[in-house]
Amino acid sequence: MAKRSDRVDSAAGWVVVGATTITLFAVFGVVYSFGAMFTAIRDEFGVGKGQAALFFSITTFIYFILGVFTGRLADRYGPRPLLLVGAAAMGIGLFLTSLVNNIVVGYLTYGIGAGIGVGCAYVPMVAAVGGWFERDRTKAMGVAVAGIGVGTLVGAPLAKQLVISYGWRTTFVALGVGSAALLVVASLGAKRPPGAGTQEAPPPLRSLLHDRRFTWLYTSMTFLSAGLFVPMIYLDDYLEAQGKGGGALLIGIIGAASVAGRLALGAVGSKVDLMRLYQCCVGALSASYVIWIFAGANYTVLVVFALCMGTAYGGWIALSPAVTAHLFGPLGLGGVLGALYTSAGIGGLVGPPVIGVVIDATTYKTAIALAIALSVLSLLLLRKATRVAASTAVDAVQPSEGHVPAESTASAWLIPSPEGGMRLIRR
């Protein structure tokens, strides 16, 4: 019999939530501060916006693709060893980046170092939180991923000030040391969920690829991610191009607003229709970009954009793991999340450099309009995923003649649903 402290929804689970908050503060405080260094790096190497954005895009691709492996490793071995590997990678990678004189080498040192750091931290720790909670899962995940917003709030303005005072190279050294130290501290609270290692195997990846819920959700996330990171990279440069400052502060405001979105919408998600709320977040992201496109250089309107975008973004991030657990169950959540988040890696790799090329060739307004189009397309695909999920749930819970459809005996299985009843997982 498990100790009371090792049960789901216990105090021990909230310790893991705290460790996850610190972890995400550390890694995303570094990655989302890149926009504050974007112009300095572009000027140093004399490249266009699309080429400079590859620093961020390659990093994003690596950590999301890596998540498909680290999620399953965390399911098997727990998150602590992975956090320690991530701490070493983050510290060494950022230190080596501070020494480079060739931008291609910089892509490798920053991309691989920060990419491995985030990849070993994000999915393993979020999945651990999901395994520690049943009743309060959505709320706990909202608190945990609030670390991303706080990291952005602190990291972007701090990095900008360090760049102004000491240059981008010294800034990378400082961020590397600080983030690595925080990851080591967080590893002390990175405990495996109750029952880990004794559960059945998670759904194999090939079964997810044949699950229409997964493929529509995956495609939706790909298109959303292609435009999602545009403010993080370009907002500071956008204002500097108009002879104004304060872009790093706007990125920080996005982070602060995202904390409110994560906490508020994470808590609300356990009381309302989760999929509908998730759609509302994606729709609000699209609408926020409309504010940006009409803001021009009006800083007050840009603050409104940052608040709206950050709140919607925070809700989307907080609800994504809960939506995944809702659709596929908590069993092997690390592996399922890792597979799903590769979509964000693909979108993050392609979207920002393409938008940077569009900015160089046309205007920022055209590029923002492209981000709006990508978000709207993502919303349409998400609505399709929701309809397919509803249809699958009806087939699973209310099969004809009171039994599982004949096809399920060879191509699907039933698992307990976190909401009660059974859920059908198709191979």
Image (spheres, helix red, strand yellow):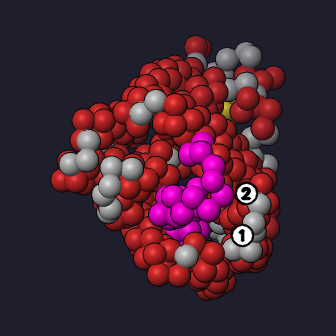
The residue shown at (47%, 45%) is: 230
Mark 2 falls on what kind of element?
A: helix
Q: Residues within 10 Å of mark 1 (few under 14, many from 20)?
A: many
- Rendered view: 317 above or below 294: below
Dominant secondary-structure state across the stretch colored magenta: helix
The residue shown at (63%, 53%) is: 46
Judge by depth and name the residue closer to the eye, 366 or 3: 366
Image quarter where the N terminus lies is bottom right
Looking at the rendered structure, the kind of residue marked 1 is Thr
Judge by depth and name the residue closer to the eye, 345 or 380: 345
Judge by depth and name the residue closer to the eye, 200 or 90: 90
Residue 37 forms part of the magenta stretch: yes
Percent across and percent down for residue 50 are: 60, 42
Pointer 2 with pointer 1, Cβ within 8 A: no
What is the number of the mark on residue 103? 2
The residue shown at (43%, 25%) is: 373
Percent across and percent down for residue 209 are: 73, 29
Q: Which residues are magenta?
A: 25-50
Q: Residues within 10 Å of mark 2 (few under 14, many from 20)?
A: many
Report which quarter residue 371 is drawn in: top left
Residue 24 forms part of the magenta stretch: no
Specify whether 342 is left or right of 29: right
Looking at the rendered structure, the kind of residue marked 2 is Ile
Percent across and percent down for residue 160 are: 45, 71
Residue assigned mark 1: 97
- The reply to whether residue 120 is in sight is no
- The reply to whether residue 155 is in sight is yes
Residue found at the very far left of the displayed protein: 300
Disc with the residue nearer the chain's start (2 vs 1) = 1
Label 2 and label 1: CA atoms lie apart by: 9 Å
